[in-house]
Amino acid sequence: MQARGIHHLGVAVENLDSALATYERLFGARVEHRATVEDQGVRAASVRIGESRVELLEPLGQDTPIGRFLEKRGPGMHHVAYEVTDLDTALAELTTAGADLIDERPRAGLFGLEVAFVHPDSVHGVLSEVVVGG
Amino acid sequence: MQARGIHHLGVAVENLDSALATYERLFGARVEHRATVEDQGVRAASVRIGESRVELLEPLGQDTPIGRFLEKRGPGMHHVAYEVTDLDTALAELTTAGADLIDERPRAGLFGLEVAFVHPDSVHGVLSEVVVGG
């Protein structure tokens, strides 16, 4: 599979507003999108840093994916998303390449993106996402 | 400070050759540089995935920065590097912005890059590097 590049880096944070202020101050980040997504248990912002993109993810509670990540690992990098041209093709090629998919079919991610996650055990411990660029 | 974007994502791995094979197979990564740097305690490869870049970092021993990271956290994302136009200016601006710098002056990074690290406590748990793009 040929990914087009890193679409975004997903970062788990304790407090979204505080993290946003830090990324704006230190790296010149500009907010692109913000959303609270109850069924994914996150309050999130997508920021642009130059040409790149970081997603800051604050859990809505402890019993959410990001809440459990923070409990176990503390704040820090959570996943990396690679941009692909077509998600169905990418998932078929990843399966052929032996990757263990968390999402066997595309699903709705944040900010209207279509996404799928690859299990970190298939990528040397890195939770990796594929996404069609928007 | 206005970073130009993500220069690379640094990933700690147990075995460089195995990780390279995975990134080539799953994401179409192409090797850009390889180096063994004794005084930094790493065997490393820089790969391009589309327009983006990932550094895969295998420790030369347990008592190295990457060795200690693997011991404590297991394999996974280690740092993110942001590209800047001028490193002295970036470090001055980061200091003014209240960041705690690990490197107060530019130092030699991998692959001939000039780099400096910002303490993860200043960036909500994310070890962040600034680098002049090459």
Image: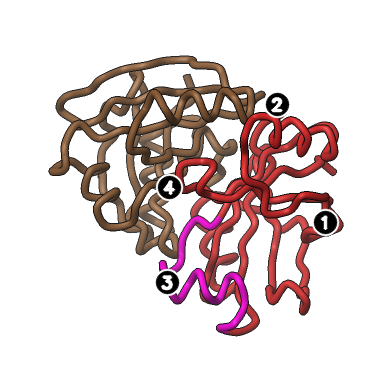
Chain colours: A red, B brown
Name the element at disc 2.
loop
- The residue beneath circle 4 is B76
Chain under callout 2: A
Chain under callout 3: A
Tags 1 and 3 touching, CB below 8 Å: no
Q: Nearer the viewer, residue B62 or B98?
A: B62
Of pointers 1 and 2, the one earlier in the residue sequence: 2
Q: Is residue B20 left or right of residue B26?
A: left
Q: Which mark is residue A72?
A: 3
Question: Which residue shows up at 49% across the image and 25% down it?
Answer: B133
Q: Nearer the viewer, residue B130 or A111?
A: A111
- The residue beneath circle 1 is A107
- The residue beneath circle 2 is A1
Of pointers 1 and 3, the one earlier in the residue sequence: 3
Tags 2 and 3 touching, CB below 8 Å: no
Is A65 included in the stretch rendered in magenta? yes
Q: Disc 1 and disc 3: Cα gap in Å?
A: 26 Å
Name the element at disc 1.
strand
**Co-location on one chain, circles 1 and 3:** yes
Magenta span covers which residues?
A62-78
**Where in the figure is residue B42, as x and y percent of width and height?**
25, 30
